[in-house]
Each structure stands twice: as structure tokens, then as C-alpha cells.
Amino acid sequence: MKVVRIEDFERPAAQGIFATPLLDGDQSNVRIIRLAPGQALPPHRHGVSDLLLYSAAGEGALDVPEGVVSFNAGSLAFYRGDEELRVRNTGSTDLTLLAFLAPKFAASA
């Protein structure tokens, strides 16, 4: 068993996008992502891994084929591995995301 606190993973001031492993299991993993105001993750997919993306703090938006969806603190989104993720910070403070992936996904963002 392992316990982590998302407050212990701050975004360095000079870095717009911060992404790092948070927890790593045998069949799944969790990454913490912090986006500075105005920042966006590069569009990407997760192959065979399903993604549950949770917004822990801040204001954001998901760009989906149907348009733009607000993605603020407390929101949870599900993506199949073949669906493209497009997320951006639309607020004035950091957008903090938790990315739960199963099966495990190894990536830099």
C-alpha cells in the first residue's frame, strides 16, 4: 500500500506543463499533470490503455469532436485508448489533473 498527496507534486514556476508518475501498479498507473494558465497538453492517444481523467483543481476545457466541454475541478472524463485527448487550462490558476490508466501506460505526458 502506498499513499501520496497531490500537494507534494508542484509545477516548477518556469515549466508550463508538468507531468509525472504518481502511483504505479502491476496493471494500472496514475500520473499527475499540472498545466499553467493558457497551457494545453499536446493532442495524443493512449493505445490500449483506457483513461479516466479527473480534474482535481482549476478550470479547463476538453476539445471533443462535438465541441468544447468545460472540465473544471470535480469533473471526471473517460477516454478509450483510441480516442484523442485534447485538454487545456482556461483559468487563471494551475489546472491539476489525475490520469488513471489501465492497463499501464508509459509516456512522458
Image: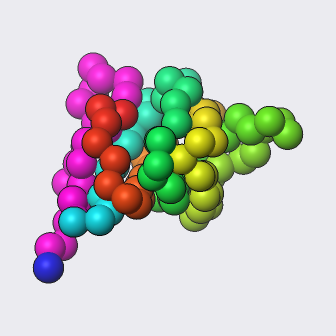
Residue 37 lies in magenta, yes or no? no
Q: Residue at x 55, y 27 (%)?
A: 43
Q: Is residue 71 left or right of residue 27?
A: right
Vertical relation: 72 (above or below) 36:
below
Residue 45 position within the rendered picture, expressed as x and y whole percent measured from the top left: 52, 36
Q: For the magenta stretch, what is the residue range?
A: 2-25
Residue 97 x %, y %: 45, 50
- Residue 75, how many percent across, how many down? 61, 61
* Quadrant the N terminus occupies: bottom left
Q: Residue furthest top?
A: 14
Specify the quadrant that holds the C terminus.
top left
Q: Is residue 19 magenta?
A: yes
Q: Residue furthest right?
A: 66
Identify the residue at image location x=18%, y=73%.
3
Q: Is residue 77 above or below residue 84?
A: below
Q: Residue 41 or 78: which is nearer the viewer?
A: 78
Residue 30 visible within the image:
no
| In the image, residue 34 above or below residue 55 | above
Residue 51 vs residue 37, the one in the foreground: 51
Q: Point out the residue furthest to the bottom here.
A: 1
Instruction: Determine the residue positioned at 54% across, 47% down.
Output: 81
Give the total of numbered labels.
0
Q: Nearer the viewer, residue 72 or 19?
A: 19
Q: Is residue 62 visible?
A: yes
Left or right of 87 on screen, residue 108: left
The type of colouring in the image is rainbow
The residue at the far front in this view is: 48
Residue visible at 31% across and 36% down in the picture: 107
* Residue 67 spot, x, y in % from top left: 83, 36
